[in-house]
Image: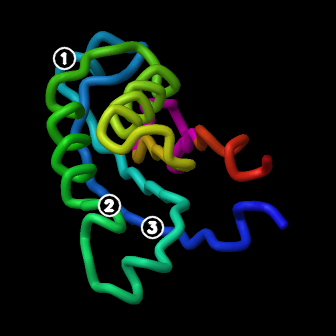
Amino acid sequence: MNQFDNSSAIHIKDINLWAHVGVLESERTHGQSFVLDIIFWLNLDESSKLDKLEKSIDYSEAVKAVQKLSFEIKCLTIEYFSEQILNLLESLYGQVPMNIMLRKCSPPIPGFTGSVLIEKQRNFSSLIN
């Protein structure tokens, strides 16, 4: 039996962000749109039974903190931006298993109309042991 047996997931989807991230100077100067999804893996048994926030996480803190970070950051890569998001979330909640998906909505690539997504996770080794 592993710790995944009692885990539930809290999904925070479609957090719209505006950040100054990109290789091109214009991207860092003018900024652009990103969309973030976050998943936290937790044991929510007590929270579910007792209706107590302290037995879960206050996900509004994550949304506010990530929005603040997106206004402040200025960097070259979405990879760096995603790492800073994970560092921020870990500073708020500790070593909770988490997964993020950060999407750059309109990368300035001629002839490309899609998006680019970085997916990263952290602290999952604690669930396997």
Residue tagged by mark 3?
11
* Pointer 3 with pointer 2, Cβ within 8 A: no
State the image coordinates of residue 87 (x, y, percent, origin top left).
Answer: 40, 28
| First of labels 2, 1 by sequence position | 1
How many other residues sit within 10 Å of disc 2, few (<14), some (14-19) or many (≥20)?
some
Residue on which disc 1 sits: 29
Magenta span: 106-118
Image quadrant occupied by the N terminus:
bottom right
Residue at 25% x, 41% y is 66
Would residue 128 appear left or right of 35 to someone viewing this image? right
Secondary structure beneath label 3: strand
Amino acid type of disc 1?
Answer: Thr
User: How many residues crowd mark 1 within 10 Å: few (<14), some (14–19), many (20+)?
Assistant: few
**Farthest residue in the right direction?**
1
Magenta span dominant secondary structure? loop
Please name whichever residue, 95 or 76, is drawn nearer the observer in this view of the structure: 95
Measure how far apart labels 3 and 2 are at the Cα level. 12 Å
Distance from disc 3 to disc 1, alpha carbons, whole Å, reads 31 Å
SS for callout 2: loop
**Which residue is at a point 48% across and 57% down the rendered structure image?**
40
Q: Which residue is mark 2?
A: 57
Q: CA distance from mark 2 to mark 1?
A: 35 Å
- Res 84 quadrant in image: top left
- Asked whether 32 or 128 is in front, the reply is 128
Q: Quadrant of residue 59?
A: bottom left
Q: Judge whether 112 appears above or below 8 on screen.
A: above
